[in-house]
Amino acid sequence: MPPKPLALQPTLPSELLTYILSHNAQPVTLIICQPRAKFLSSLKRSTTSRQTAPPPENEPQDAASEQAPPHPLLIPTLQQIATSRSMKLVFIPTVSHLRAYLAVFTSPEGKEKRQYKEGQEKGKKAPLLVAYGLVELHKDTSEWSAQGLGNSVAGLVEA
């Protein structure tokens, strides 16, 4: 039995990547439903925003000069490196590109069902197929309807 689809609330790119890295599933296919530059700038903002808080005016200069610890994604751990090697990123700019990609989608190794069965026997988690920004991709298009979203989600579930 394949894994059940899971819909999560909208999150920041850094929260999404933290979730994927902590899930520890391999392989991972991450479909990002926005242009690459927009996603990377959003990721950069979400990982640096907590570091750039202005220091309070009434604290001494030494306390103000201390920097906040870096975001956990900015610290390369062995788990991050190992998971990122089996992660496939796809940037999808339009709904038609998304549906075309999902129509021909195969897992990175082409043996997803067999790997899932073996993984269940060994206690591993199922492979992940994650779509980020799916609803936002449909906004302001002719596909912004229940039917348009339903068609895209159906393609995602079938993949």
Image (cartoon, rainbow, N blue to C red):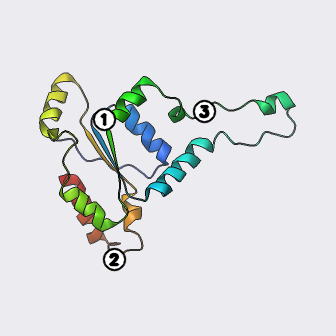
SS state under label 2: loop
Q: Position of residue 87 (x, y in %)?
A: 33, 39
Q: Position of residue 157 (x, y in %)?
A: 22, 53
Q: Compare marks 3 and 1 and give the one earlier in the sequence.
A: 3
SS state under label 1: loop
Q: Compare marks 2 and 1 and give the one earlier in the sequence.
A: 1
Q: Which residue is mark 3?
A: 70
Q: CA distance from mark 3 to mark 2?
A: 42 Å
> Which residue occupies the foreground of this view, 38 or 56?
38
Q: Which residue is mark 2?
A: 142
Q: Amino acid at mark 2?
A: Ser
Marks 2 and 1 in Cβ contact (< 8 Å): no
Q: CA distance from mark 2 to mark 1?
A: 35 Å
Q: Quadrant of residue 2?
A: top left
Q: Quadrant of residue 118?
A: top left
Near mark 3 (Cα within 10 A), the count class, few <14, some 14-19 or many ≥20, is few
Q: Quadrant of residue 152?
A: bottom left
Residue at point 57% right, 35% down? 71
Left or right of 142 in this view: 76: right
Above/below status of 148 relative to 21: below
The label shown at residue 86 is: 1
Residue at point 54% right, 34% down? 74
Above/below status of 1 relative to 42: above
Quarter containing the N terminus: top left
> Which residue occupies the foreground of this view, 71 or 11?
71
Q: CA distance from mark 3 to mark 1?
A: 25 Å
